[in-house]
Image: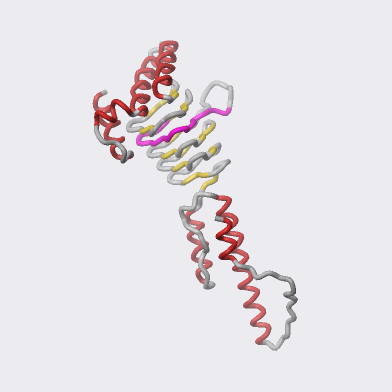
């Protein structure tokens, strides 16, 4: 028991730069208190003292603002930062070294009994306000963005953001950057860690338009070299400025 408590305290110092002393962590961190209460309620639940387990869990919710059902399985070195509004359902499983921020919900999507809450692997980070719903699996080392609503499995090491959550494809972004570099322009205002998939899609469309315009210009230039005269009606057409469009999208 004391070994686990020491682990819990050391984890706070690793993941929260605001922590100043062991006494401060033990006395003022609701995430520590919620995990300690859950260890007691989980044991009572396994001993089939269900009402007592729920009552103690209810008391823990009152003093911490964190609701963890006694039937949930919480791994070692789990850190609940701030914690207010965190809800973890009965059949949820949280792997070792996971970090949850305030407002996180590990909830169900069905009234049927059985497995109805998510399973989080090891080392998962769930941002503030995120909702992970249903009997889905979040792989080891995955990251869930703040306020994301996740209803499908997330692979290990992936990042999911948005409503509903989408997986950010860093490999696809690298390939795209290499492709546009070949034709002599940069991917405007794009970064691999951009966390809004809608904005990424808009930037992708803008960049695709640049690629298309570049190819058309090459075709027209080649036709001119072959002696063909091409009339272009540009009256009233506004100049396409990808840099400006990318800025306003951001």
Q: Which quarter of the rendered picture does the N terminus lie within?
A: top left
Q: Going 45% across and 24% down the picture, which residue do you hit? A: 67
Q: How is the image coloured?
A: secondary structure
225 or 99: which is nearer to us? 99
Q: Residue at x 24, y 31 (%)?
A: 22
Q: Which quadrant is home to the C terminus?
A: bottom right
Residue range of the region highlighted in magenta in the rendering:
94-109
- Residue at 51% of width from left, 39% of height from top? 147
Number of marks in the image? 0
Residue 30 falls in image quadrant? top left
Position of 239 relative to 38 (above/below): below
Q: Where in the figure is residue 138, as x and y percent of width and height?
A: 47, 38
* Magenta part, dominant SS: loop
Residue 181: x, y in percent?
A: 50, 69
Judge by depth and name the residue closer to the eye, 172 or 115: 172
229 vs 208: above or below: below
Query: Is 202 situated above or below 30?
Result: below
Residue that extends furthest to the bottom in the rendered view of this protein: 227
Q: Position of residue 221 (x, y in %)?
A: 64, 82
Examine the structure image and report whether residue 105 is included in the region drawn in magenta.
yes
């Amino acid at each position: 028991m004391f070994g686990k408590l020491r682990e819990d305290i050391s984890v706070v110092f690793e993941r929260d730069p605001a922590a100043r002393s062991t006494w401060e962590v033990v006395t003022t961190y609701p995430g520590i208190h919620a995990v300690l209460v859950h260890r007691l309620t989980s044991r009572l639940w396994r001993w089939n003292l269900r009402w007592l387990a729920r009552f103690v869990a209810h008391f823990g919710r009152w003093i911490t603002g964190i609701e963890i059902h006694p039937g949930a399985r919480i791994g070692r070195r789990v850190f609940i930062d701030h914690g207010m509004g965190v809800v973890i359902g009965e059949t949820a499983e949280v792997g070792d070294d996971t970090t949850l921020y305030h407002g996180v919900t590990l909830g169900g999507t069905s009234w049927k009994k059985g497995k109805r809450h998510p399973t989080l692997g090891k080392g998962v980070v769930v941002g503030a306000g995120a909702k992970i719903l249903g009997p889905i699996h979040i792989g080891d080392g995955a990251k869930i963005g703040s306020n994301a609503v996740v209803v499908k499995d997330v692979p290990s090491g992936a990042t999911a953001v948005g409503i509903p959550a989408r997986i950010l494809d860093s490999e696809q972004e690298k390939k795209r950057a290499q492709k546009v570099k070949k034709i002599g322009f940069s991917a405007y205002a794009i970064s691999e860690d951009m966390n809004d998939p809608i904005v990424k899609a808009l930037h992708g469309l803008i960049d695709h338009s640049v690629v298309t315009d570049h190819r058309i210009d090459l075709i027209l230039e080649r036709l001119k070299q072959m002696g063909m005269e091409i009339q272009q009606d540009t009256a009233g057409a506004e100049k396409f400025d990808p840099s400006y469009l990318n800025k306003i999208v951001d």
